[in-house]
Amino acid sequence: MDTTQLLKGVLDVAVLAVVEDEDGYGYDVVRRLRTAGLDDVGDASVYGTLRRLYAGGALTSYVVPSDSGPHRKYYGISPQGRQMLETQRKVWTDFATTMSGLLGRDGAAA
């Protein structure tokens, strides 16, 4: 199965989950998503998602100066983003349960 379309549908919530406990800069978020198993995630998609979530109020941002390279823009989750993440966790759980029933080995649909 091509996971590209699935990834598009869950990238927002995946990014929120990655920065829930620890703020991160763009490439750090990409790296953490890939480490978690989302190997096909594209850099540009993540950067666009970070910008969109920030513009929508789900993320905060701040710049950390660097002596050995460009400054890094870090993103953290806002209270609005935490609420969004909690809602999406419930939606995902319900959806995954439904799909697991549909795709179950015994062929029985719920």
Image (cartoon, rainbow, N blue to C red):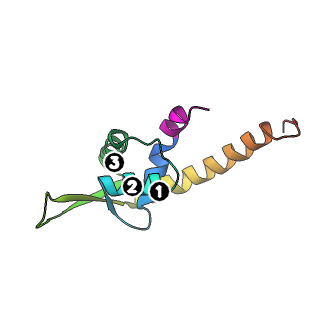
In the rendered structure, which disc, 3 or 2, sits on the residue that comes first in sequence?
Answer: 2
On screen, 101 above or below 20?
A: above
Left or right of residue 45: residue 39: right
- Classify mark 1: helix, strand or loop: helix
Residue occupying image coordinates x 39% and y 67% = 22
Q: Determine the image quadrant of residue 67.
A: bottom left
Residue extending farthest to the left is 67
* Amino acid on which the number 2 mark rests in the picture: Arg
**Which image quarter is the C terminus in?**
top right
- Residue 31 lies left or right of residue 99; in this view the side is left
- Callout 1, which amino acid? Thr
The mark lying in front, picked from 3 and 2, is 2
Does residue 27 lie above or below 105 as drawn? below
Assess whether residue 108 is covered by the magenta stretch: no
Magenta segment = 1-9
Mark number displayed over residue 106: none
For the point 79% across and 42% down, the residue is 101
* Residue that carries the numbered disc 3 in the rendered image: 50
Q: Mark 2 points at which residue?
A: 31
Q: Going from the N terminus, do you reach mark 3 or mark 1 first?
A: 1
Q: Is mark 3 on a helix, strand or loop?
A: helix
Give the vertical position of 62 relative to 12 (above or below): below
- The answer to whether the residue labelled 1 contacts the one labelled 2, judged by CB atoms less than 8 Å apart, is yes
Label 1: how many residues lie within 10 Å, few (<14), some (14-19) or many (20+)? few
Q: How far apart are marks 1 and 2 (CA)?
A: 6 Å
Q: What element carries label 2?
A: helix
Q: Callout 3: few (<14), some (14-19), or many (20+) C-alpha neighbours within 10 Å? A: many
Q: Position of residue 84 (x, y in %)?
A: 48, 52
Left or right: residue 39 compared with residue 73 = right
Residue position marked by numbered label 1 in the rendering: 35
Is the stretch drawn in magenta largely helix, strand or loop?
A: helix
